[in-house]
Amino acid sequence: MRIGFVVNRLRSLRSTYTTTRLAVSAARSGLQVLFIDVHGFTLDPANRLMAVAHRLPADVDEPEALVERCRRGTLERGLLDLEQLDGLVLRNNPVRRTVLDAARVLRDRGVPVWNDPDGLAAGAGKLYLSDLPVALKPRTVVTRDPDVLRAFLRELGGPAVLKPIRGFGGRAVIRLEADEEPRLSAYAERIRETSDGYVVLQEYLPTAERGDKRILLVEGKPVGCYVRMRKEGEFRHNIHVGGRPVPGELDEADHAICQALGERLRRDGVFLAGLDVIGQRAVEVNVVAPGGVANIERTSGRPIAGTIVERLVGQMQNSEGKRIDPGRVEPRWTDTARGW
């Protein structure tokens, strides 16, 4: 069975990335694994959807070894008819409209795609939690109206977190105090030309001092978690801004949130999602290339990547009888890759 992973830049992969961990685990399980260039899609005159693909060798069974071969550009490179895949995993971030369109074509031709491109489009912004019961999330307003933002900040009467409606990794996220209306207006004006000008203003939860829990959900159900602890002097918990991973456990409140969110994730075809919880409130859900596998494995000792790949294989096997097999035409591989 063949599985493809759409990535932004092959040479920038790291051994701690969830994409790398999933790819290595898939190779260990006997799947033929291919990395697909986010810029390499082609619809040819015969209406075949093609893509530049890099094939992982069967003997690469450690993330560090795979990353080194990607960095050196020694993976075999070829042009692949994507209908030859048994499944496609979208791991590119940010979301690209052309990639989503190509993924829809492939999905409609019977090839499983994770996460579903329509689910990705719906969840790429920060409105995905809009259907979650109010009691399970912080008080939040989403708008581009400065007057609404100022009024809500005054209503909160305490610290708040301001962020763009589309973003990841803690970028452009700031903390505001109740008396910082001038700073609020300046920030909103600065990002007016991005993300359609919409921003999210959310109450700051004091329980954030005890960390931000990242929960990974597969098919709408939690498979593991860890806690991100922010560094001194920083209010964000993101790992790339100095946060550190520590062990975490799912509690009753976490399960309630996962249960409330799980049905929509399954309905939208979101196979893998990352849920961020502070205290007993869901702060954000990430459906675009969610990460956390390496940190969960490190802090819990559980093989999360293997669990996720097992579920992927199960879905591929279930879909085999529903699609017309176009035949097994081998890609045209070159001896060495030239890089992206």
Image (cartoon, rainbow, N blue to C red):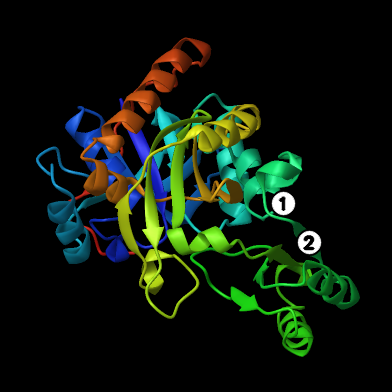
Residue drawn at x 56%, y 50% as measured from the top left: 99
- Label 2's element? strand
- How many numbered marks have been drawn onto this rendered protein structure? 2
Count residues near mark 2 (Cα–Cα under 10 Å), then give few for <14, some for 14-19, many for 20+: some
**Quadrant of the frame with the C terminus:** bottom left
Nearest the viewer among 293 and 148 is: 148
Q: Is residue 131 left or right of residue 55?
A: right
Q: Earlier in the sequence, mark 2 or mark 1?
A: 1
- Which residue, given by chain and number where applicable, does mark 1 sit on? 127
- Where residue 309 appears, as percent x and y from the top left, is 32, 31
Snapshot quadrant of residue 145: bottom right
Q: Is residue 333 visible?
A: no
- Which residue, given by chain and number where applicable, does mark 2 sit on? 142
- Label 1's element? loop
Of the residues shown, which amino acid type is indicated by label 2?
Val
Quick check: 274 above or below 3?
below
Residue drawn at x 88%, y 70% as measured from the top left: 148
- Where residue 102 appears, as percent x and y from the top left, is 57, 44
Q: Is residue 92 visible?
A: yes
* Tag 2 and tag 1, C-beta contact below 8 Å: yes
Count residues near mark 1 (Cα–Cα under 10 Å), then give few for <14, some for 14-19, many for 20+: some
Nearest the viewer among 136 and 6 is: 136
Nearest the viewer among 144 and 74 is: 144
- Where residue 252 appears, as percent x and y from the top left, is 51, 32
Of the residues shown, which amino acid type is indicated by label 1?
Leu
Quick check: 322 above or below 181?
above
Separation of residues labelled 2 and 1 (CA atoms): 8 Å
